[in-house]
């Protein structure tokens, strides 16, 4: 099994090196925007078609010969090529309708994350303890090596975020097929009042990084609006806002990593709801002909959903489980919080409030999020045992005629999870 992993560190570039990196990022941003403009022209003329990387690379060669853009000769060619490959990948993901993929956008100086990638690391770059040697006239640059880099380094990416430079090393290593040390299965319900509720009764409170810092961000943005645009003080205030956004993102990312690592370490199979976060957080304002209702309340709910980072949490769970030899199973989310885990009665009246569940048929009472997690786990067992709810082809079983004779599924057996009959 080949594992590809990234290791990110703070880069301590000198003033001279920082200036050179900004120039390199500017070259890459210009090429991205110019190529994207030509791709839009092709897409408008020919439908779902844009030139591939091989054609884009020829554009760069032509731009270097033109008088207005001959300054591109000073750029590091590998950086430009990698930017065009990223653009090509972005278009292909968009056309294939990969989940979360959006149409490539133009990059604006100061608003987009600037970055450049250095490939053929073993040939052009070198690491000496806490220093890395980079090409393009950068030389040796110090970085904060907070942990050991495992595997062979294939490339590195240098990016500017929140007023600081960072470097990410992409490594590759071959390991034996991992076997998860645990044999348990857990259901996970994601929410707003509680970030995570597990079917064993434990839960994790939300950090709500944006909500906590929303006041500070609003004050900083009002201060920016009172300054002369593009003045020195405006630039300083803009940098302050960027740092605040980075802090919010870091708080959210830290919470997600800690929660996903804890759950991944303790459970071989994790069952979650197959939530369509984009649809759930879509605006309700409507249009002139069909105006929305309860727009303000829906806006607040959308903000709370996005503040939790549900999609990123699922992404982290999936790759961490793959590293450890576990699995993540996404099951349909319908009626998980309205179904009684005792008598299986389904009714909207079962959920008396956001946090309280009381079955109108048998009287069972419990926290609504915990009920949802229990039902998610039970649904995961049924999917693995009987192939219900759209189980992936890799683990589907043959139709069972006599459910009393159901044998343990392949997915259960492979992970060592005790089997339950339907």
Image (cartoon, rainbow, N blue to C red):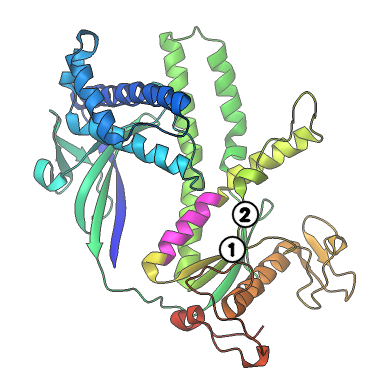
Residue at mark 1 to residue at mark 2: CA–CA distance: 9 Å
Image position of 192 (left or right of 165)? right
- Would you say residue 58 sits in the magenta stretch? no
> Can you identify the residue that label 1 sits on?
272
Image position of 40 (left or right of 294)? left
Point out residue 190 in the picture as x, y percentages from the top left corner: 63, 57
In contact (CB < 8 Å): disc 1 and disc 2 = yes
Residue nearest the observer in this picture, 376 or 230: 376
Helix, strand or loop under label 1:
strand
Above or below for 40 versus 7: above
> Can you identify the residue that label 2 sits on?
275
Residue lying farthest to the bottom in this orientation: 405
For disc 2, the neighbor class at 10 Å (few under 14, some 14 to 19, many from 20) is: some
Above or below for 247 versus 21: below
- Would residue 116 be seen by someone viewing this image from the given angle? no
Above or below for 125 versus 163: below
Q: Residue at x 41, y 75 (%)?
A: 180
Above or below for 249 versus 181: above
Q: Quadrant of the N terminus?
A: bottom left
- Would residue 78 be seen by someone viewing this image from the given angle? yes
The residue stretch that appears in magenta = 311-321
Residue lying farthest to the front in this orientation: 46
Residue nearest the observer in this picture, 321 or 36: 36
Helix, strand or loop under label 2:
loop
Q: Residue at x 56, y 13 (%)?
A: 225
Q: Quadrant of the C terminus?
A: bottom right
Dominant secondary structure (helix, strand or loop) of the stretch shown in magenta: helix
């Amino acid at each position: 099994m080949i594992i590809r992993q990234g290791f990110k560190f703070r880069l301590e570039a000198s003033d001279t090196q920082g200036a050179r990196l900004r120039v390199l990022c500017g070259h890459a941003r210009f090429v991205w925007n110019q190529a994207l403009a030509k791709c839009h022209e092709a897409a408008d003329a020919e439908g779902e078609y844009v030139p591939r990387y091989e054609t884009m690379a020829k554009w760069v060669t032509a731009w270097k010969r033109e008088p207005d853009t001959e300054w591109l000769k000073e750029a590091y060619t590998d950086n430009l090529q990698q930017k065009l490959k990223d653009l090509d990948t972005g278009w292909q993901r968009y056309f294939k309708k990969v989940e979360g993929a959006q149409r490539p956008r133009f990059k604006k100086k100061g608003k987009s994350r600037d970055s450049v990638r250095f490939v053929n690391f073993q040939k052009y770059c070198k690491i000496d303890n806490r220093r890395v040697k980079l090409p393009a006239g950068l030389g040796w640059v110090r970085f904060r090596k907070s942990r050991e880099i495992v595997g062979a380094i294939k490339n590195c990416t240098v990016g500017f975020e929140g007023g600081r430079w960072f470097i990410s090393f992409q490594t590759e290593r071959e390991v034996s097929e991992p076997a998860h040390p645990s044999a348990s299965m857990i259901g996970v319900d994601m929410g707003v009042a509680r970030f995570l509720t597990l079917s064993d009764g434990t839960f994790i409170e939300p950090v709500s990084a944006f909500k906590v810092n929303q006041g500070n961000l609003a004050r900083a943005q009002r201060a920016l609006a009172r300054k002369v645009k593009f003045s020195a003080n405006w630039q300083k205030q803009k940098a302050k806002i960027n740092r605040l956004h980075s802090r919010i993102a870091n708080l959210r990312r830290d919470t997600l990593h800690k929660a996903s690592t804890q759950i991944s370490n303790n459970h071989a199979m994790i069952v979650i709801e197959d939530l369509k976060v984009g649809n759930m957080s879509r605006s309700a304002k409507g249009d002139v002909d069909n105006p929305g209702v309860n727009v303000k309340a829906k806006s607040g709910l959308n903000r709370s959903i996005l503040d939790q980072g549900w999609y990123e949490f699922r992404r982290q769970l999936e790759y961490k489980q793959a590293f450890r030899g576990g699995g993540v199973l996404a099951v349909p989310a319908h009626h998980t919080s309205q179904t009684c885990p005792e008598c299986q009665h389904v009714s909207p009246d079962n959920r008396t409030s956001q946090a309280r569940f009381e079955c109108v048929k048998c009287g069972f009472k419990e926290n609504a999020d915990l009920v949802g997690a229990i039902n998610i786990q039970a649904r995961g067992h049924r999917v693995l045992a009987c192939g219900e709810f759209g189980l992936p082809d890799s683990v589907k079983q043959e139709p069972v005629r006599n459910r009393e004779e159901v044998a343990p599924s392949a997915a259960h057996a492979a992970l060592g999870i005790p089997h339950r009959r339907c």
